[in-house]
């Protein structure tokens, strides 16, 4: 076998090992995600009663989107403090945590075996692939939870977002009677969550995992406060969806920004890895 | 006990991660001060330009409280700078960063030096005390810095109770009597409260680290996620009908609140519950072998 | 101070790591533990240090039982499974920090101990930059700098060159001269034969043989 072919084979095996090791250490977190998704969607849908909305009128897309319902942007008023939406923050930070620890721990520990047998680039790309798959698995669990609640509510399986869902999280939305298509929003949401997790990974290698997590938490808090296309958390919030909310962010723009961010994270990570010495640092997070 | 405490304090305070956490906290405190000062300036400059005076020279609207250093202090937040919100939401992470990971790092190796010379109770107690002091410092120092900067730019008008809607400090807010009668004492008391809450949180993170093996990311992040989960689920599910009893650590560290001001018992409950949980976790850890 | 580990047994779930082991460590003598990897030497040392509780048996320090009469070992310095020191401090700072706990060792004691193991007391390099051999030397210094009554050394010759091995022999001899009780584990029998007054040979968690090499 040629050296190149051997390296490619080693890289493929390293990826398979990553998938096995990475997922086996996260099983309880997936279980927790399922539990949280069920609670969160149920609480959001139950809260729609308060706004005079019938549960059964909310579509499947509404149920799913309410997992990332969010809140209206903060309007300044003296003496009224800003409170970020706790459920939205918790859901996204849970995803951030699930993609945070494994790549860094692998670099400091077991992954050094892989680094001696395959190239650094293939190691990093393997981690990126693991992150993408973890994010997909996370959202698949949320989709499953939304589906269960939709079935129990007897709600329609439609990919349209209705006024009812928006009314639960914001008083600003103006949705046409037939609703608006949910696919662009979900695509933007998926793309942005992948991009942010990749950026977190790169930052974790360069600085430290806890600092990377803190930066992401800060970004989400600031995004919840202010509606602006540059604040990336806005693309992960139903209450900021352009086309429904005046001044909202466009999910297609979000998809584009996510693609650029993801590419920059991977390229930045490759650049960093090529130059850095892989010594056994203290394993402090 | 003095020796082991000095040993742990030396490790805790001569520690670059304390510098990192303090730097982040201080940057946010400075940013919050800058935001508050510019907001006050932006709010009142047009009034001055129109010939309307504010503060002590006002003929119509006094606006003392929200233009004062006390009203604009980070914990009170009358003009709601975003940086102070970010600070309080990051505070549980920042307090844990300097020293809460130390037990987990030392358990398999360095801890033996302490356990050879002192009992486990003394060793763990000293580590918890150091963690408490460091965690409290990470929150208290930026609060003090913020107050000093704000005081350099905004006058120390006595807050007025009839402006409570603008400051968010109502009669049942924590230490509100001091805020309206002896505001400097209020600043000291609230800083002390935040110091204690942050310190207790840091000790809890240290105690939770006994549950994780070689996973320091979990030590810092999992308690934070737990805190957010508590903040989200408990008011909605458990205390849905109990107004004001919010045991959310983040909001207990702020003087003003979104809806009903919390019961003082809530902060007191936290100051009892957090150390109690930490104590139980350490008690279980005391029995384990150091391998 | 005379130390006795009497009838020590330690089991983890199904595995018996130590099986009715009795070891005496008299003052002013060097007691050796010899055995292959996994024979239980390190576990026994951890039990004597109070880091691990035995399933049965007791450790006595001058007839006081560890865990009953004593909450922690009396006057003990140890190097177990490698030097455990802080990465971002110098060697001197590391020892001074440990010395804060008892408050008995002076800066002079620390410098003397560091010099004794062949390192420079004024070294400004941080511990994380030390070579493996330097780390091991500093670990030995950490075990002896407070002049404890019991010195426990687990594989002290690991990562050391010939001069390092000679240094270990000198340090152990000096501790014996001082009147300390020394317990030393080593897989290199020749080192134990050169320094130990009495050797316990361990196999599969048991003492199978005792020797008096000197």
Image (cartoon, rainbow, N blue to C red):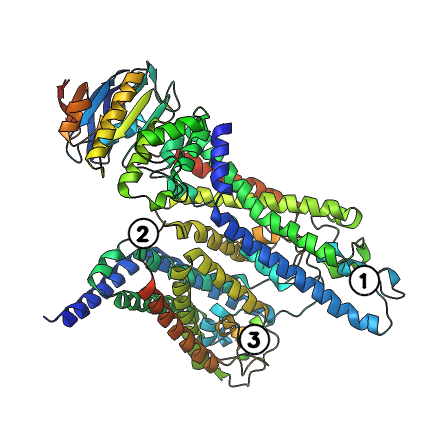
Q: Which residue is mark 2?
A: A280
Q: Chain of mark 3?
A: A
Q: Which mark is on residue A228?
A: 3
On screen, residue C165 above or below A33: above
Q: Which residue is mark 1?
A: B63
| Residue C23 x/y as whole percent | 22, 20
Q: Which one is in front in this view, the residue at disc 2 or the one at disc 1?
A: 2
| Neighbour tally class for label 1: few under 14, some 14-19, many 20 plus, Cα within 10 Å | many
| Residue A96 x/y as whole percent | 42, 62
Q: Secondary structure at mark 2?
A: loop
| Neighbour tally class for label 2: few under 14, some 14-19, many 20 plus, Cα within 10 Å | few
Q: CA distance from mark 2 to mark 3?
A: 41 Å
Quarter holding the C terminus of chain C is top left
On screen, residue A172 above or below C159: below
Q: CA distance from mark 2 to mark 1?
A: 58 Å
First in residue order: circle 2 vs circle 3: 3
| Residue B207 x/y as whole percent | 45, 41
| Residue A54 x/y as whole percent | 54, 73
Using the rendered view, name the quadrant where residue A108 is placed: bottom left
The answer to whether mark 3 and mark 1 are in CB contact below 8 A is no
Of A260 and A190, the residue lying toward us: A260
């Amino acid at each position: 076998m040629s050296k190149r072919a051997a390296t490619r084979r080693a890289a493929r095996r390293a990826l398979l090992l990553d998938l096995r090791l990475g997922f086996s250490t996260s099983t309880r977190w997936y279980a927790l995600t399922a539990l949280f998704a069920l609670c969160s969607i149920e609480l959001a849908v139950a809260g729609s009663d308060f706004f005079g909305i019938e549960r059964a009128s909310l579509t499947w897309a509404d149920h799913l989107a309410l997992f990332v319902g969010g809140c209206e942007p903060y309007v300044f008023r003296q003496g009224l403090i800003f409170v970020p939406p706790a459920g939205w923050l918790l859901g996204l930070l849970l995803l951030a945590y699930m993609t945070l620890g494994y790549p860094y721990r692998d670099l400091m520990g077991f992954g050094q075996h892989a680094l001696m047998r395959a190239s650094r680039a293939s190691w990093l790309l393997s981690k990126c692939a693991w992150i993408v798959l973890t994010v997909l698995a996370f959202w698949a669990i949320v989709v499953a939870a939304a589906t269960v609640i939709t079935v129990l509510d007897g709600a329609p399986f439609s990919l349209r977002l209705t006024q009812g869902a928006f009314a639960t999280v914001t008083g600003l939305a103006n949705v046409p009677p037939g609703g608006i298509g949910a696919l662009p929003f979900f695509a933007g949401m998926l793309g942005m969550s992948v991009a942010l997790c990749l950026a977190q990974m790169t930052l974790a290698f360069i600085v430290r995992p806890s600092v990377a997590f803190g930066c992401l938490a800060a970004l989400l808090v600031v995004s919840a406060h202010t509606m602006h296309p540059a604040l990336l958390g806005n693309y992960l919030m139903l209450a900021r969806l352009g086309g429904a909310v005046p001044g909202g962010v466009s999910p297609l723009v979000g998809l584009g920004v996510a693609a650029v961010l993801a590419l920059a994270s991977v390229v930045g990570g490759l650049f960093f890895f090529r130059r850095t010495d892989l010594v056994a640092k203290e394993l402090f997070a | 006990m003095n020796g082991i405490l000095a040993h742990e304090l030396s490790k805790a305070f001569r520690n670059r991660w304390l510098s990192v956490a303090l730097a982040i906290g201080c940057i946010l405190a400075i940013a919050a001060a800058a935001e508050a000062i510019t907001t006050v300036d932006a709010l009142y400059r047009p009034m001055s330009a129109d010939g309307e005076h504010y503060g002590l020279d006002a003929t119509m609207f006094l606006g003392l409280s929200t233009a004062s250093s006390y009203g604009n202090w980070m914990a009170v937040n009358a003009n709601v700078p975003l940086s102070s919100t970010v600070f309080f939401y990051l505070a549980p992470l920042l307090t844990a960063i300097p020293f809460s990971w130390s037990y987990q790092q030392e358990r398999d190796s360095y801890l033996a030096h302490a356990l050879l010379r002192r009992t486990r109770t003394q060793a763990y107690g000293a580590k918890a005390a150091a963690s408490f002091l460091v965690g409290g410092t990470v929150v208290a120092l930026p609060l003090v810095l913020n107050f000093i900067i704000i005081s350099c730019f905004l006058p120390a008008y006595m807050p007025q109770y009839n402006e409570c809607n603008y400051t968010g400090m109502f009669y049942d807010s924590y230490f509100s009597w001091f805020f309206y009668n002896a505001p400097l004492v209020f600043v000291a008391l609230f800083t002390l409260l935040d110091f204690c809450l942050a310190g207790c949180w840091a000790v809890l993170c240290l105690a939770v680290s006994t549950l994780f093996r070689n996973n320091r990311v979990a030590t810092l992040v999992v308690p934070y996620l737990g805190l957010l989960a508590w903040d989200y689920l408990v008011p909605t599910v458990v205390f849905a009908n109990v107004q004001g009893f919010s045991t959310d650590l983040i909001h207990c560290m702020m003087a003003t609140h979104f809806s009903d001001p919390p019961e003082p018992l809530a902060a007191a409950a936290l100051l009892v519950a957090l150390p109690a949980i930490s104590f139980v976790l350490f008690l279980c850890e005391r029995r384990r072998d150091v391998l | 101070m005379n130390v006795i580990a009497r009838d020590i047994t330690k089991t983890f779930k199904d595995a018996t790591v130590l099986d009715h082991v009795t070891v005496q460590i008299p003052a002013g003598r060097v007691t050796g533990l010899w055995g292959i990897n996994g024979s239980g030497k390190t576990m026994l040392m951890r039990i004597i240090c109070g880091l691990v509780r035995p399933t049965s048996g007791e450790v006595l320090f001058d007839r006081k039982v560890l865990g009953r009469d004593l909450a922690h070992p009396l006057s003990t310095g140890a190097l177990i499974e490698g030097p455990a020191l802080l990465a971002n401090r110098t060697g001197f700072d590391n020892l001074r920090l440990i010395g804060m706990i008892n408050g008995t060792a002076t800066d002079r004691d620390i410098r003397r101990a560091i010099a004794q193991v062949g390192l420079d007391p004024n070294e400004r390099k941080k511990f994380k930059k030390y070579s493996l051999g330097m780390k091991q030397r500093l670990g030995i210094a950490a075990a002896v700098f407070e002049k404890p009554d019991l010195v426990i050394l687990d594989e002290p010759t690991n990562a050391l060159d010939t001069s390092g091995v000679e240094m270990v022999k000198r340090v152990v001899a000096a501790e014996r001269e001082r009147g300390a009780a020394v317990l030393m584990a080593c897989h290199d029998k020749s080192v134990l034969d050169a320094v130990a007054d009495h050797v316990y040979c361990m196999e599969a968690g048991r003492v199978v043989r005792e020797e008096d090499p000197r």
